[in-house]
Image: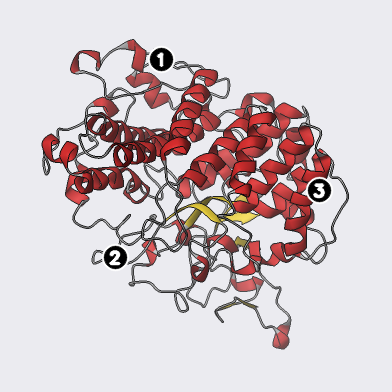
Amino acid sequence: MKSLYKFSTITAMTALLVGTGYSCKNSLDVNPQGEITEAQIISDPNVASNLVTGIYNIFFAGDAFGNDVRGFQFTVLGDIASDDADKGSTASDYGDANTIDQLTANGNNGVVNNIWKGYYQAIARANQALSQLQNAQFDATVKNRLIGEARFLRAMFYFNLVRIFGGVPLLDRVPAASEANSPQFQTRATAEDIYKFVIADLTFAAENLPVIANNSADVGRASKGAAQALLSKVYLYNKDYTNAYAMSDAVIKSNNYSLLADYTLLFRQVSNNSKESIFEIQAGQNLACNAAIDRFTVAQGPRAGGKNGWVDRGYGFNNPSQSLVNEFEAGDVRKNATIITINPSNGANSVGTVLYDGFRIPTQDSVQNQRYNYKAYYSRQAEPNCGNFDRLPKHVMVIRYAEVLLIHAEAALQTGQGGIAQSDINQLRTRAKVPTIGIPTLQQIWHERRVELAMEQDRFFDLVRQDAVQPGRAAAAFAADGKTWNANRALFPIPQQQIDLSGGLLKPNPSN
């Protein structure tokens, strides 16, 4: 989409959607509209659409080491906390990420607080937009589409929050001034209630959002397929395999998506908004050179160390683990498309590691870590950018067709349709150039999930989900990565700062 995420003429307007406070209480203190009037919003669909665009722009409003929704702070929780990755960088760098990597974080951890604040900023934007859109007087189809976009995004925010923290305060609207200090918005709803809310939002979105082609001017906005795909994932987390199958089946049978033939191209700029993409966070180039997630690529880029002597590409965080390396089968093309492996020194015959764009990383004696996330790499020489390397215009995939096939396969197997599960899994394996299999076991499907979606910021949450299906799975997986697991770590600690701001109404998790 040409105008989405651009921080252009709508920036001033969208900046007014959220107050400067970040606690659950203070996130309700939303400033009034300054650049536009309510009359314009409810009468002009173009103005209303810009209001909704302000919700998407929250992805750019964050900081790699501050308030965040889907950037590096989320990467710490989704990847580094899991068995797929280790913190990386130097041993002393970023202690908060280290305690999360070691599964020992408490409520004073800065990462969980940054995530909490970022997500409640995002929810405040969605609720502000919805409070205005409900009074819209233009075409009902357009009105419901815009409401559907806002509800899709709000559902995605709450889905991540419930996976991270469990039950959280449920802000389903912009409270009236008299409600600003209400305990209703300071206490935790149950996880079950959050999931019901997410399902309701996504159901409305699926019923009211349009199909959006990947070459459409609206690409990047929430679509019918995106709502159905995310809803199928939510149902999978709730072990509602019948509905997970139905929703993923609807996406598959829409014929609007398919696998990109070459997996190695999937995370390069040339494949932005490909036929496999169902919802991805957009990025681009604007006059301010800031239309991208802050340091998403740089934080995970290869880092100089040892002898140094080269211009490196980042801070060196989020290193793929040896456990992940071991998970790939021989010949699986996904391994080298996922992991940058630093070659050892070989004296005069050393060649280093040459990336797809020709960039050469020296041998291990000049590099800090052994492995890096190839899916986060953005070429400064072969892919367009405007010179701000902290905000390289890297798109971030949120959900893609391959994951829908995996959801479909797991739900099919759990509902006695092994043949369908086999077909789904073998589509992925054929692309990966590994042998096809017969009717898969649940463990084989989970293996396929791991290698297909590795380093896409989802593994920790998926492993916790799998452990709820098969107790003991998480402990074994973490042990293989040298980490000690216990059930109290299934949810991250509630930030102590937020507990304090609530006056103790917000109760901690066992991990606090």
The residue shown at (60%, 75%) is 355
Q: Are marks 3 and 1 in contact (CB under 8 Å)?
A: no
Q: Is residue 83 visible?
A: no
Q: x%, y% of residue 220?
A: 41, 54
Disc ID at residue 471: none
Residue 187: which numbered mark, if any? 1
Dot 3 and dot 2 residues touching (CB under 8 Å): no
Q: Nearer the viewer, residue 357 or 368?
A: 357
Cα–Cα gap, marks 3 and 2: 46 Å
Label 2 CA crowd tier, 10 Å (few <14, some 14–19, many 20+): some
Label 1 environment density (alpha carbons within 10 Å; few <14, some 14–19, many ≥20): some
Q: Nearer the viewer, residue 286 or 512?
A: 286
- Kindly identify the amino acid type of the residue bearing the numbered disc 2: Cys
Relative placement, left or right, of 102 versus 47 is: right
Q: Nearer the viewer, residue 374 or 495?
A: 374
- Single out the mark in the foreground, 3 or 1: 3
Element on which disc 2 rests: loop
Q: Amino acid at mark 3?
A: Gln
Q: Earlier in the sequence, mark 3 or mark 2?
A: 2
As drawn, the label of residue 422 is 3
**Residue at point 64%, 34% (across, down):** 244
Q: Position of residue 411 (x, y in %)?
A: 72, 36
Q: Is residue 6 left or right of residue 245?
A: left
Left or right of 41? Residue 464 is right
Q: Which residue is mark 2?
A: 289
Q: Residue at x 86, y 45 (%)?
A: 439
